């Protein structure tokens, strides 16, 4: 089964709005945490064949820090918050005043700071989505992983796509203008039945 | 060095020597590499899930029947069932999941299918929690594995 053949233009627009609202809230949450302005770009909806997933990433082997938060409730899915190694280290330093040396070997403190940043952002997104759709949604326990970006994205998406041969990603780019090179990337992976629930709640068939 | 073929998630490729078969970002997925040690015809499959009972759709996502389909093609392209050897990598558990370890189940299923086809498994790098990218050289049968190591570096090993 493929999403590509199932989604209408209108439905894709709705997903873009979902991304806008969700990431807007996540950006505000990040901004409050670090006391700096955070910008978001217009979300992109990508429907990608699983077999092509690596082609949509510039450098699939880039080392990246990711927080994964499962979405539980009426419309299950997954949220992924990704920061490049450099960005993740900068963020940690904003909060605890010290930049870790080695992201692949973070101490307890570094790990929990990074996990919490991702958690707060993903949860803000999920709350916004829940308010927007009046669906009951809650966040699962966050997980932190530092690994190659291709594997992280693949691993998260295949968990929500057993019966589909492609995945939907609602992608948002975030940046901190005062700190030029700090950029984050967040994406939501809705699971099969969840999308039809979101659409029907919003009155779109 | 021959050409490189990049294999996507849930896909496979069969080729003759000299070819390098590559797949990236194996998390809980398993890369199964099978090669005829004499004719050097071989293949690689990027297995996502253990098993399906469907008969249509993308069957190469599954260890069973994906591996069987690939082995048939290797034989068609000049491989000899008796001379096939397998190496596998992947099946990590990247997220600290509770109870449900898909990587481990994938590895177990892959081994079961290899055993049923009587293809010896001569080397493996499986489990743990790091993702892997792999390169399989049909010329030599060497399997190169890239993993994130300490100091934010990618480590290269060979099995």
Image (cartoon, coloured by chain):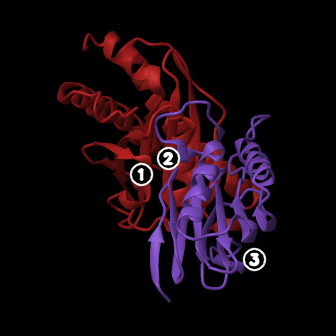
Chain colours: A red, B purple
Q: Given contact means CB atoms under 8 Å apart, are the residues at marks 2 and 1 in contact?
A: yes
How much space separates mark 2 and mark 1, taking CA atoms? Answer: 6 Å
Q: Which residue is mark 1?
A: A185
Dividing the picture into quadrants, the one containing residue B82 is bottom right
Nearer the camera: disc 2 or disc 3:
3
Front residue of B12/A143: it is: B12
Dividing the picture into quadrants, the one containing residue A139 is top right
Q: Which residue is mark 2?
A: A81
What residue is shown at x 62% (from left), y 34% (from top)?
B52
Q: Which residue is mark 3?
A: B159
Chain ID at mark 2? A
The image shows residue B56 at horizontal and vertical percentages of 48, 34
Q: Is residue A101 visible?
A: no
Chain ID at mark 1? A
In the image, residue A108 sits, relative to residue B81, either above or below, namely above
What residue is shown at x 58% (from left), y 36% (from top)?
A69
Q: Secondary structure at mark 1?
A: strand
Is disc 2 surrounded by few (<14), some (14 to 19) or many (20+) residues within 10 Å? many
Dividing the picture into quadrants, the one containing residue B42 is bottom right
Q: Secondary structure at mark 3?
A: loop
């Amino acid at each position: 089964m493929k999403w590509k053949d199932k989604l209408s233009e209108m439905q894709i627009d709705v997903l873009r709005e979902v991304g806008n609202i969700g990431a807007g809230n996540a950006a505000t949450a990040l901004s409050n945490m670090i006391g700096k302005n955070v910008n978001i770009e217009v979300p992109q909806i990508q429907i990608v064949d699983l077999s092509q997933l690596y082609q949509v990433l510039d450098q699939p082997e880039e080392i990246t820090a990711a927080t994964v938060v499962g979405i539980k409730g009426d419309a299950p899915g997954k949220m992924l918050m990704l920061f490049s190694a450099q960005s993740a280290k900068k963020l940690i330093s904003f909060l605890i005043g010290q930049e870790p040396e080695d992201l692949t070997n973070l101490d307890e403190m570094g790990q929990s700071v990074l996990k919490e940043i991702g958690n707060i952002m993903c949860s803000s997104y999920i709350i916004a989505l829940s308010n927007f759709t009046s669906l009951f949604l809650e966040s699962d326990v966050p997980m932190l992983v530092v690994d190659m970006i291709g594997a992280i994205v693949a691993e998260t998406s295949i968990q929500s796509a057993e019966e589909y041969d492609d995945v939907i990603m609602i992608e948002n780019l975030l940046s901190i203008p005062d700190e030029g090179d700090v950029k984050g990337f967040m994406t939501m992976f809705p699971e099969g039945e969840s999308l039809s629930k979101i659409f029907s709640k919003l009155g779109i068939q | 060095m021959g050409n490189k073929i990049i294999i996507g998630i849930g896909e496979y490729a069969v080729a003759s020597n000299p070819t390098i078969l590559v797949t990236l970002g194996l998390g809980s997925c398993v890369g199964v590499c099978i090669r005829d040690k004499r004719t050097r015809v071989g293949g690689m499959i990027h297995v996502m899930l253990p098993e399906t009972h469907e008969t249509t759709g993308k069957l190469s996502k599954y260890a069973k029947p994906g591996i069987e389909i690939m082995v048939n093609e290797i034989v068609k392209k000049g491989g000899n069932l008796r001379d096939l050897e397998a190496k596998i990598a992947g099946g990590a558990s990247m997220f600290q999941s509770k109870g449900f370890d898909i990587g481990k189940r994938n590895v177990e299923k892959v081994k079961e299918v290899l055993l049923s086809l009587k293809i010896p498994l001569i080397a493996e790098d499986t489990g743990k929690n790091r993702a892997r990218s792999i390169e399989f050289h049909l010329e030599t049968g060497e399997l190169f594995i890239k993993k994130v190591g300490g100091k934010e570096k990618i480590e290269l090993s060979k099995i």
